[in-house]
Image: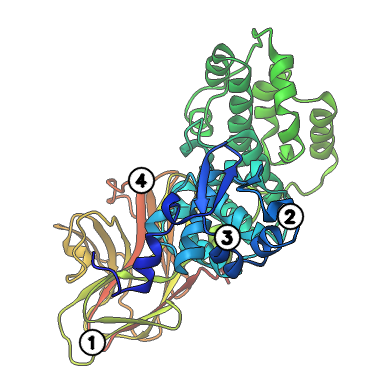
Amino acid sequence: MTRGYSLEQDLRLLVNNPKYSDVEILCEDEKILHGCRAILAARSEVFDRLLYNGMKESYEKQISFPKIKSAGMEIILEYIYTGSVKEESLTKDNTVEAFYAADYFQLSDLQDFILKTVKNTNFAKNYSPELLSKISEKMPLTEDNILLNLLVEAAANILLNRIEFGRLSIMGLKYLLSCTYEKEKPFVTPEYEVFRYSAILAAKQVSNDAHKIFMKQLPTLEQLENTSPIKVENKFTGHQKVAKELETLVKFIDFRRIKPQILADIIEPLEIIPDKIISNVYRYVALSSNLNLNNTRGISINEIGYYFWDKSACGSKLVIEDNGKIVYALDGYNSHQSVRAKIALEDKGIFEWDVIIEKACSYSWVGVCASENLNYESWAGAQPTGWVLGSGGALYNHNKVVRNYCPAFGDGARIAVHLDMNKRTCTFSVNGKKYREVSEWNNLPSKLYPVVSFNSPGRFRILPHQKN
């Protein structure tokens, strides 16, 4: 590329280039990078104080940073020289290092860019276990760490049994559990599965044999619900080593949320949980007059309202407004189109939400869809991956129609959808009256989204289900 046309591109040629450098930067991993003293000092007060303080660092050809790895320092140099960082420069391997280094060098704009990238892309969703593991090694656990809170929020919305062992370290898991323990924060993993994942992860630190044994001795919650009662006999002689590895996690597991039968038949025989914790749970059960703890910590999706229409999964003639809560059709557009909500409802759990028809149209449909192959330019009920209730009172799924499910509804109607992903069933309420389970829909997949279909002048609002 010809020089002189872009200052940023010309300065990028200087990044870590020995030819134009007068100082070596020795990193934690013993890798040496190259920099220009004047540029570094001009762009960072920390570098200025280090390189022009009149002390020995001012004259030596090499400066060292024993707590900053080269992966993070490379991002620092890119930002210092060019004033920006390419989004593709950030990876799951260097993001935490770069954030830590940006904090060290007091580069707040770079920190903001990293946070924005993690938040506005699929970075946190795809890599939160790995990033949590890295941040637990690099930074202390503090409530004001914005990156940590962002990663905890993302990881808390992933079922632990979907995170492969090796992606999340024990310290990373400790950060996740401690940040959500007895907190009113979203969390999707039932507490028994929290214990199971923690115990198997601890066993993996002991040996491969221990890992295999605990995988067999700790069935998933789904296996427990679908099989005859299981009673574990502890035949593993190294249980004390597993208990030792588990120590750092146990205090952040709420055993009161686990069924006493599971505690007695599955957990207690393993001999990896202190007797005092077990006895305290039994005492709690015996003395509590109202055992109303959920089997999952925090607050559920239904309580916090993660229901918003998705602009990326919306018909071209539909408009989303009010921060994603309302969708309406453009005036005069008569063909029916669809829009789904952002949130994916998958695995286990019961999900409920309301759709209010603020303005009716010729025909309206409310229900669920699978995102695969759904054509949002058409109505969902005509497609194999759409299951909807129509305003005429009939149920639709592709070429299957069930008449007279409920009376017809229109302006002002509140349609509640009750989706039980444990049993893969769906039920509807209309204006407060709940109707039967739709037994005809016996083909619901493991991942669904709320969906509506309508035309002009339709206007629909989505919100968490209000039982009263």
Numbered disc total = 4
Judged left or right of residue 359, residue 189 is right
Q: Name which residue lies at 43% across and 71% down.
A: 308
Disc nearest the viewer among 2 and 1: 2
Residue 37: numbered disc: 3
Instruction: Say which amino acid is labelled 3.
Output: Arg
Label 4 or label 3, whichever comes before in sequence order: 3
**Residue at the spot of label 2:** 142
CA gap between label 1 and label 3 equals: 64 Å
Badge 1, how many Cα within 10 Å: few under 14, some, many 20+? many
Which residue type does callout 1 highlight? Ser
Q: Nearer the viewer, mark 4 or mark 3?
A: 3
Q: In which quarter of the image is the N terminus?
A: bottom left
Image quadrant in which you'd find residue 171: top right
Q: Where is residue 190 in the image (x, y as percent from the top left)?
A: 59, 42
Residue 186 can be seen in this image: no
Which residue is found at the position 64% from the left and 7% from the top? 235
